[in-house]
Image (tube, rainbow, N blue to C red):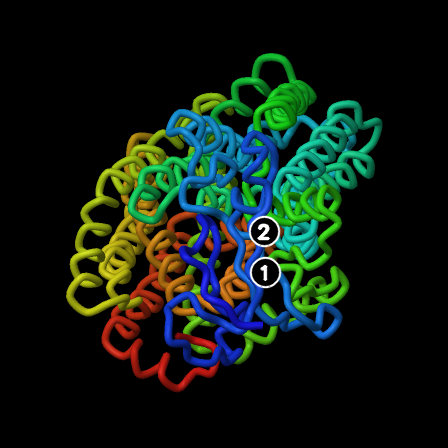
Amino acid sequence: MSFVPPSLPKGLSSEPVSPGIHVPPASHPYERDVVLRHIGDEHPDEDHVSDAGTRTGVATDLEDAGKVTLVEWDANDPENPRNLSRLRKWVITLLSSSLCLSVALGSSIVTGDIPGPMEEFQVSEEVVNLTVTLFVVGFGVGPLVFAPLSEILGRYPVYCISMGLYFIFTLPSALAPNIGCLIASRALAGIASSAPMTNVGGTLADIWDVEDRGFAMAVFSVSIFMGPCIGPIVGGFIGETVGWRWIYWVLFIFVGVVFVATVFLMPETLSPVLLRRRAQRLREKTGDMTLKTESELHHVSLAEKVKISLTRPLILLVTEPLLICMSGYLTFIYSLLYLFFFAYPIVLIPKGLNAGEIGLTFIGVMVGIFIAMLLLPVQEKAYLKVCSQRGVVPEARLPFMMFGSVLLPFSLFIFAWTSLPHVHWIGPTIAGVPFGAAMVTVYISANSYIIDTYQRYTASAVAAKTFLRSIVGATVPLWVNQMYAGMTPQWASTLLAFLAILAMPIPFIFFRYGDRIRAKSTKAN
């Protein structure tokens, strides 16, 4: 049936559902061999298709063969997460960042009093260190389930499930009658708490436009980097004053507060889920089964999504040189952060500091993080300038990483040769400043480079990086004490500095040859 409407109703588009479907040329811009529907003008206060927008075309899913009316957002739709008020967006941003803070804090706060459970349960330090190792392993394992689940259920239910389980599994740690219970509960808490670490970036992308997203992403990044640094400070003083169990009680209370805030204040922000709900309401109200969303036309089962989330990251990790190098560098940086949680006490206890005072030395790392975050707008401005001239160039992300790669060995050499017992404790503390700056500059640049390079496979590329980083980083507590005891703190840290020098050319190589490497990849842009 072909007709020419006098004007195209608001919210309607006669574009085909898929760009691969041919639409015959027409003598009038609105003339198409399709049927347009516009429902609900008589009840503007109720759900109607024009709120979401519709366009009609041929379904690409065989089960929905025929013509469909596609439910979409209108530009000013109040239910579109991008149209939330600025205040509401910042509430969501701060709450989302607090989710990541609670998880990052939980990974390191227990290092504030490792001797406590050692003495109570009469076990070795390596056994107690498993409370950190298995928690961090959960960061790599959990997203393999939570990521596809969020596409089906939405971000809000996954946040609630994740934080609720994190809250529950933290309680047995505080009440643990033996070391087995403590380790098992920490492993479960690590897996349960992993959803925010992979989903919060997506939440911010849901609500902020690209040009307004920079500061929100900076707040999110600060929560990720600051959490592990705050942990030893808080845990050290709690363990020193009221004992190791109160470390878990404080974490339990904090996670509980964040969990309750999430339940009552966090909305759903994933557009495909919101549109599916709207389409379902409209189908029930009108009886029109041709009302569909884009995601319903390209339906993939949960089992298939889990399969993809389990296999594709590993395939990318062994076949993509760019991803291998960048993920390896980020894994090295991440491992150094967790190594410092154990190296600082080894170095500073002989200088006469107690657990609480050792925790305060991580302020140096925090200062470095803040300095790097202040420099971030400079890098972002330079990147946008390149993009305005040449389009999206992933390598334009790398100058910040190049700067950080030079700072990293410098910080490790300072830490190495101020760790001698007769050198004042301020030396290792100062070493934390360039380390914190290097960590942030390398991480943010490399992460952005991966995302820009693998836009079609971003979720899998990020999952691959997260999996490798978490698994390798989790092993650090198992060997760091032996390394520093066998080599002495000076030479152990010097070895790490030389490894950092070996890794230093990575961003320079990709800055020079990255476009050629990407051109040879079947997965990169």
Residue mark closest to the camera, 1 vs 2: 1
Quarter the C terminus occupies: bottom left
Residue lying at the far bottom of the rendered structure:
520
Look at the picture and state if 490 lies above or below 513. above
Residue 35: x, y in percent?
A: 58, 64
Q: Using residue 201 as the reference point, say whether residue 113 is left or right of it.
A: right
The quarter of the displayed image where residue 254 is located: top right
Look at the picture and state if 49 lies above or below 332. above
Quarter the N terminus occupies: bottom right
Residue 226: x, y in percent?
A: 43, 34
Residue 341: x, y in percent?
A: 50, 39
Q: Do the residues labelled 1 and 2 touch (CB within 8 Å)?
A: yes
Q: Mark 2 points at which residue?
A: 272
Look at the picture and state if 161 lies above or below 238. below
Q: Name the residue under label 1.
A: 294
Residue 179: x, y in percent?
A: 79, 35
- Give 21 or 397, whichever is nearer the viewer: 21
Label 1: few (<14), some (14–19) or many (≥20) C-alpha neighbours in 10 Å: some
The quarter of the displayed image where residue 258 is located: top right
Whichever of labels 1 and 2 marks the residue nearer the N terminus, that label is: 2
Label 1, label 2: how far apart the Cα atoms are: 8 Å
Name the residue: 50% across, 68% down.
Answer: 3
Q: Regarding mark 1 in the picture, which secondary structure is present there?
A: helix
Name the residue: 63% across, 70% down.
Answer: 59
Q: Is residue 138 visible?
A: no
Residue lying at the far top of the rendered structure:
241
Q: Which amino acid does label 2 sit on?
A: Pro
Q: Using residue 399 as the reference point, say whether residue 43 is left or right of it.
A: right
